[in-house]
Image (spheres, grey):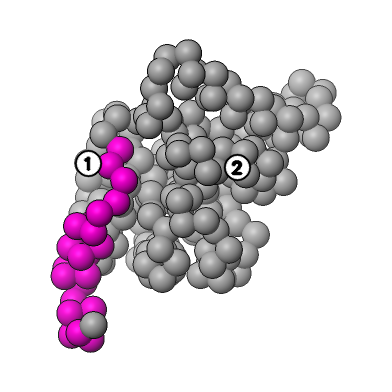
């Protein structure tokens, strides 16, 4: 290994993306990594919170059935949390040859916080490398400088942690409605993507609104 090459962000990125990795040309992804939303639904329905865990296991079975009925092997993906609600479902989905994304952000956090860990790098050591690290960031390029810098530092921390762990990274960008005038959402997302690229953050995946 050449330390000068390793230190060059562009060369390191090119090396990473040109090394043979599974190609996902078409994906049908079922997302049920929601945590606070499922809890709120359970409360509204007067249902036992423990049933959320059962529901997520059933959703894995639903994805399995769709894969079989539609004959879409190699095109199935899921987004599942690894906490109390989704851990069983996540374990069931992993190892099937599916694309598997797993969230790392604390739901609703702004500035960004990581869920159930103070050290995201230490947490990722225990993740299977086939699980894609998904992180939702409520970010606007015109945020106050202090908030923007704090969020960028968190994303950089996560980026470096995934480079060390070998997991792919998916970034989801959602500009907060309170600071995003109607009709400017696309521009805010585009500027955010450009900003992260300029910072050297080059995730394998982006999750963006259509």
Q: Is residue 81 left or right of residue 161?
A: right
Question: What kind of secondary structure does the magenta stretch mostly adopt?
Answer: helix
Q: Earlier in the sequence, mark 1 or mark 2?
A: 2
Which contiguous range is marked in magenta?
2-24
Task: Locate residue 169, reporting x and y percent.
Answer: 38, 54
**Residue at coordinates 75% horizontally, 24% vertically from top-left?**
44
Neighbor class of circle 1 (other Cα within 10 Å; few <14, some 14-19, many 20+) is few
Residue 100 bears which disc, if any? none
Circle nearer the viewer, 1 or 2: 2
In this view, the residue in front, 177 or 172, is 172
Task: Locate residue 147, reporting x and y percent.
Answer: 42, 63
Q: For the residues marked 1 and 2, what is the alpha-carbon distance in whole angstroms?
A: 34 Å
Task: Locate residue 174, reporting x and y percent.
Answer: 39, 42
Dot 1 lies on which element?
helix
Residue that carries the numbered disc 1 in the rendered image: 187
Q: Is residue 210 above or below residue 114?
A: above
Task: Locate residue 22, reporting x and y percent.
Answer: 31, 46
Most extreme residue toward the top is: 69
**Residue at coordinates 26% horizontally, 34% vertically from top-left?**
25
Dot 2 lies on which element?
helix
Dividing the picture into quadrants, the one containing residue 12 is bottom left
Q: Is residue 186 visible?
A: yes
In this view, the residue in front, 61 or 30, is 61
The C terminus is located in which quarter? Answer: top left
**Residue at coordinates 56% horizontally, 71% vertically from top-left?**
122
Residue that carries the numbered disc 2 in the rendered image: 90
Q: Is residue 3 magenta?
A: yes
Q: Is residue 8 magenta?
A: yes
In this view, the residue in front, 184 or 201, is 201
């Amino acid at each position: 290994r050449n330390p000068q090459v390793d230190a060059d962000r562009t060369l390191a990125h090119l090396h990473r993306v040109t090394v043979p990795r599974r190609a996902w040309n078409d994906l049908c992804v079922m997302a049920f990594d929601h945590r606070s939303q499922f809890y709120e639904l359970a409360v509204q329905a007067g249902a036992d919170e423990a049933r959320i865990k059962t529901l997520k296991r059933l959703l894995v079975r639903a994805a399995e059935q769709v894969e079989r009925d539609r004959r879409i092997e190699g095109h199935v993906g899921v987004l599942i949390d690894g906490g109390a609600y989704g851990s069983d479902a996540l374990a069931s989905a992993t190892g099937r040859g599916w694309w598997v994304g797993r969230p790392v952000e604390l739901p609703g956090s702004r500035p960004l916080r990581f869920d159930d860990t103070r050290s995201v790098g230490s947490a990722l050591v225990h993740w299977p490398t086939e699980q894609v690290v998904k992180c939702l960031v409520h970010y606007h390029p015109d945020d106050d400088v202090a908030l923007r810098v704090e969020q960028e530092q968190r994303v950089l921390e996560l980026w470096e942690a995934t480079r060390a762990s070998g997991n792919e990274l998916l970034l989801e960008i959602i500009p907060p409605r309170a600071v995003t005038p109607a009709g400017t959402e696309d521009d805010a997302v585009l500027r955010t993507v450009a900003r992260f690229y300029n910072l050297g953050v080059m995730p394998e995946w982006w999750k963006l609104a259509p």
